[in-house]
Image (cartoon, helix red, strand yellow):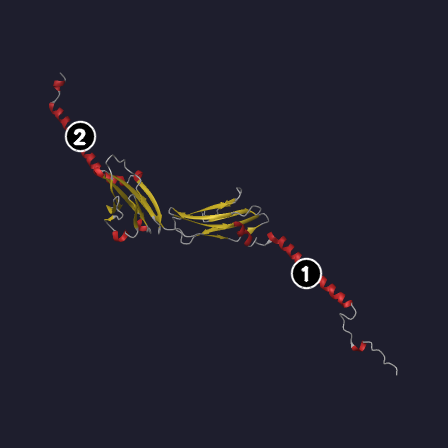
């Protein structure tokens, strides 16, 4: 009874809505599928991050090898770059061919880009402008393809650092010294850290007091009873790293020792006493020798002719 009471117009409308929903779903799938290539570029799981230094080299290597079915072979690998709006093919490499086939920018990149093998590309003499996204499209027989994406960041080389030491203050047991890691032309993206060798655990190590922590400067309190330690300043960025090392024992030994020189006053006085004793002993020996010479007859004293004894003339 209820089935016969249904409105045929409502039944037709519900079927039309269901069909429209199916069509829209299929259309959405097609649209999303057409943008798959673009979405893969942003897929971090398929992106290889590479870092390089200006003037050095970097290699791109295809690591995602597809499962080759029987009869499926590698046809070629296309290497390219991506700018803001489009993907550009740079060159293509085919198995068994030593020379790549250039497509774009051959006159700019041919001297710097080298194909090491079918799956590896190297760029020499990197510039800051080389930073960006690159990709490799692996083309197989039977129409199969797989893509791999790279993001390259090129950094400026960090300068060679130098450790400068302020005037140390030395007591009989400790050496207090402040060290500065100096690297000319540093930028904000450069990091600095300190590494030590031979320092005891109880060493007092702190940044120089100031409005904000200064990682480029460190103050040390060194026990003189310990073997001579060393400290290393490490200047780095994500693409480069340089170091400088300083012997702390040498720093404490060659600098002025304390504001009044009292740290080594006993040693100085001891040395002065030894020198005075040597000089006194030498003067004593010299005077004794001269006194002995003066007591010998006919030596050490001049006799005037008026006092000289002249024997009387012989009688005739």
Crowd rating for badge 1 (residues with CA inside 10 Å; few <14, some 14–19, many 20+): few
For disc 2, the marked residue is 22
* Residue 313 placement: quadrant: bottom right
**Whether label 1 touches label 2, CB < 8 Å:** no
Query: Does the image show residue 149?
Result: yes
Q: Is residue 120 left or right of residue 257?
A: left
At x 69%, y 61%, the residue is: 282
Q: Where, quadrant-wise, is the C terminus in this rendering? A: bottom right
Q: Residue furthest top?
A: 1
At x 27%, y 43%, the residue is: 136
Query: Does the image show residue 210?
Result: no
Q: Residue furthest bottom?
A: 316
| Mark seen at residue 30 | none
Residue 27 placement (x, y as % from top left): 18, 34
The local secondary structure at tag 2 comes to helix
Residue 276 placement (x, y as % from top left): 67, 59
* Residue 281 placement: quadrant: bottom right
Q: Where, quadrant-wise, is the N terminus in this rendering? A: top left
Residue 198 placement (x, y as % from top left): 52, 45
Q: Nearer the viewer, residue 141 or 22?
A: 141
| Mark seen at residue 279 | 1
Q: Is residue 232 left or right of residue 99?
A: right
The local secondary structure at tag 1 comes to helix
């Amino acid at each position: 009874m209820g089935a016969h009471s249904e409105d045929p117009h409502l039944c037709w409308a519900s079927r039309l809505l269901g069909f429209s929903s199916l069509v829209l779903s299929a259309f959405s799938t097609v649209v999303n599928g057409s943008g798959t290539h673009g979405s893969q570029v942003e897929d971090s799981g398929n992106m290889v991050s590479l870092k390089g230094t200006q003037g050095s080299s970097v290699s791109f290597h295809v690591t995602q090898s597809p499962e080759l079915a029987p009869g499926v072979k590698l046809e070629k690998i296309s290497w390219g770059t991506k700018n803001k709006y489009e993907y550009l093919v740079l060159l293509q490499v085919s198995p068994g061919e030593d020379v790549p086939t250039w497509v774009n920018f051959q006159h700019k990149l041919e001297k710097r880009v080298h194909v090491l093998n079918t799956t590896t590309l190297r760029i020499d003499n990197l510039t800051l402008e080389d930073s960006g996204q690159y990709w490799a499209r692996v083309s197989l027989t039977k129409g199969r393809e797989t893509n791999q994406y790279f993001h390259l960041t090129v950094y400026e080389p960090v300068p060679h650092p130098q450790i400068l030491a302020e005037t140390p203050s030395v007591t009989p047991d400790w050496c207090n010294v402040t060290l500065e890691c100096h690297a000319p032309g540093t930028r904000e993206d450069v990091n600095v850290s300190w590494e030590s060798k031979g320092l005891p655990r109880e060493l007092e190590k702190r940044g120089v007091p100031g409005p904000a922590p200064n990682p480029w400067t460190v103050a040390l309190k060194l026990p003189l009873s310990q073997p001579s330690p060393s400290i290393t300043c490490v200047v780095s960025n994500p693409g480069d790293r340089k170091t400088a090392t300083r012997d702390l024992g040498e720093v404490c030994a060659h600098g002025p020792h304390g504001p009044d020189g009292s740290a080594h006053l006993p040693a100085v006085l001891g040395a002065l006493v030894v020198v005075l004793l040597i000089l006194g002993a030498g003067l004593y020996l010299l005077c004794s020798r001269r006194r002995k010479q003066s007591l010998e007859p006919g030596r050490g004293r001049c006799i005037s002719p008026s006092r000289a004894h002249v024997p009387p003339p012989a009688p005739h």
